[in-house]
Amino acid sequence: MAIVTTSIPALWNYSYDYDYDDELCRRTDEANIRGYFTAAYYFLVVIVSLFGNILVVVILLKYENPINLTNTLILNLAVSDLFFTLGLPFWAYYHINGWTLGEATCKMVGFIFYVGFYSGSIILILMTLHRYVAVMNPLSDIVSTKGFWSAMVSLIIWVVSIGLGTPAFIFSEVQDGIYCTMGRNTWTLWWIYQQNILFVATSGVFILCYSQIICRLLRPTAQRRRVKTLKVIFALIVVFFLSWGPYNVVLLLQSFNYLPKEAVFSKDVAQSCETMKQQDNAFFVCHLFAFAHCCLNPVFYVFVGVKFKNHLKKMLKGSGHSNHGLRSRQSCLTVTSLTSGDDFTI
């Protein structure tokens, strides 16, 4: 059984080989411990994510109108998280045994994983913009969009995500019989910088929209429950930046290892290896927080909703009736959210 710590490129890079073959850049016992811990962590995330996101899908389809734009975005977010989750069992196996599943599986798993990753980021941006409009201009047609335009939004989300994930399918390959990775450093750099840009864009939307929403909710004329709403917004922002901020910083630092290097002396090699080990230690911790987003999203974007919790109670008690579901669907013509100053309804 071969414990490996090299994983899919640009999302987490545990290999110290790069352009050096020096033994100083290799690990043994530490790699074994991390390999098992990472695999166990992934399986825990998979279980929680499957439970939470499948529950979201079931309740949306059973009790709500999925063509409402709010519900459409939440449904797409759950599907996106499930896509991201589907890749984790394979990467858990990879951390323990190396990649022994063949090149076709390497390409497909990488593609599915990246489609889930990028679609999730795009949907979070759209959800934030939608909430911003719902708070700042609640009478806007965008707030009550449904039907055809909701379908078009879903189509755009997945077309763009599939386009961004396609290079992973084309260029992923198995190297040395155990590594599922990109064939060239150029593509690895492309993936890293693409993720950094997406994080900056998402952060910009978060800061701009939620700062304006908070200012609106702090007005004396704001609706009731604003204290609870502000707490949720604050928690949402803190979790987002603590999860993805350090992760993207370490990714950016790791990208320098893939740039062309000049010939170096042995002492410089040792120093470079030590630097990469420090980056690896930081990345090991950061990616654990970042990859938990697929099971945290249902909590922050759905489970805190009073209406959703009521649906969940009815489902658990087996007392849901089709006529009540019809009334719920008819009542969702106007969007309310965590950030609208009232309870979040889906």
Image (spheres, helix red, strand yellow):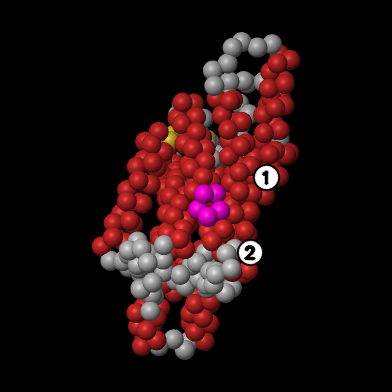
Number of numbered discs present?
2
Residue at the image point whose x is 56% and y is 53% from the top: 211
Which label is found at residue 156?
A: none
Classed neighbour count for the residue bearing mark 1: other residues with Cα under 10 Å, few (<14), some (14–19), many (≥20): few
Q: Quadrant of residue 139?
A: bottom left
SS state under label 1: helix
Which label is found at residue 285?
A: 1
Residue 266 lies, in percent from the top left, at 71, 13
Residue at the image point whose x is 42% and y is 59% from the top: 133
* In the foreground, 278 or 17: 278
* In the foreground, 148 or 112: 148
- Above/below status of 332 relative to 230: below
- Marks 2 and 1, the one that precedes in the sequence: 2
Residue at the image point whose x is 49% and y is 48% from the top: 205
Q: Amino acid at mark 1?
A: Val
Classed neighbour count for the residue bearing mark 2: other residues with Cα under 10 Å, few (<14), some (14–19), many (≥20): few
> Which residues are drawn in magenta?
207-212
* In the foreground, 50 or 92: 50
Q: Quadrant of residue 64?
A: bottom left
Whether residue 220 is visible here, answered yes or no, is yes
Residue 92 lies, in percent from the top left, at 57, 49
Does the magenta portion include 106?
A: no
Q: Amino acid at mark 2?
A: Lys
| Tag 2 residue | 231
